Image: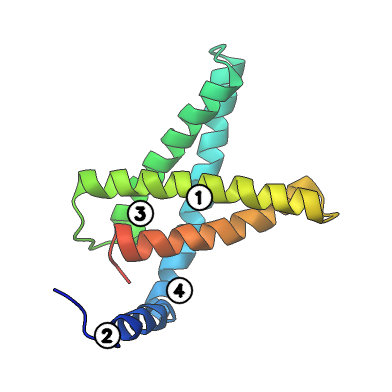
Amino acid sequence: MALQPGQAEQAQGNLLTRFFKARVGWMLVRNTVVSTGVFLVGLGVLWLLVEYAGVDEVPASGIGFITANTLHYILGRAWIFKGTTRSLSSGYALFLVNGVVGLGLTMALMAVALEFTPINYLVSRVLVSVIAGLVIFALNAALVFRRV
């Protein structure tokens, strides 16, 4: 179905307006709780694999990333974006794509922050995670889980 002139702008405006609802704010709060928890789980998996299983840091980082993102998807489906109509498999695939987008965005923003500001790398990482996290939340809410 083709959009009539002006409908694309109206649909875009409606989407932006839908993000500024209390319901979406609570989704963002739940997402922040889950994101923090799964980040710690991912770090724990990384640490266990490197320190106790003798896995190299790079593949261990990937395993930790996938573990954390899988757990985030499960909790997202059940608690953050409850009621999604997206199928489990296509939703998970899109969620992982968004995770890779978030990883790329994080790396790019870190490179910019470290190159052009005097901000400490740890402070930069926290600031970057807020920006990247909001972008990924918006993509997940609108595209993956279709709850906005």
Q: Residue furthest front?
A: 5
- Quarter in which the C terminus is drawn: bottom left
The answer to whether residue 62 is above or below residue 93 is above
- Frontmost of labels 1 and 4 is 1
Residue 99 in percent (x, y) is at: 44, 46
Badge 3 marks a residue whose secondary structure is: helix
The residue to which callout 4 is attached is 25
Q: How far separated are the C-alphas under marks 2 and 4? A: 26 Å
- Evaluate if marks 1 and 3 touch, with contact meaning CB atoms under 8 Å apart: no
- Evaluate if marks 2 and 1 touch, with contact meaning CB atoms under 8 Å apart: no
Q: Earlier in the sequence, mark 2 or mark 3?
A: 2
- Name which residue lies at 46% across and 28% down: 63
Q: Amino acid at mark 1?
A: Gly
Badge 1 marks a residue whose secondary structure is: helix
- Quarter in which the N terminus is drawn: bottom left
Q: How far separated are the C-alphas under marks 2 and 3? A: 31 Å
Q: How far separated are the C-alphas under marks 2 and 1? A: 30 Å
Local crowd size for mark 1, using a 10 Å CA cut-off: few (<14), some (14–19), many (≥20):
many
Q: Which label was assigned to residue 76?
A: 3
The residue to which callout 2 is attached is 7
78 left or right, relative to 37: left
The answer to whether residue 70 is above or below residue 10 is above
- Name which residue lies at 50% across and 50% down: 102
The residue to which callout 1 is attached is 102
Residue 37 in percent (x, y) is at: 51, 47
Local crowd size for mark 4, using a 10 Å CA cut-off: few (<14), some (14–19), many (≥20):
few
Residue 5 in percent (x, y) is at: 26, 87
Q: Amino acid at mark 2?
A: Gln
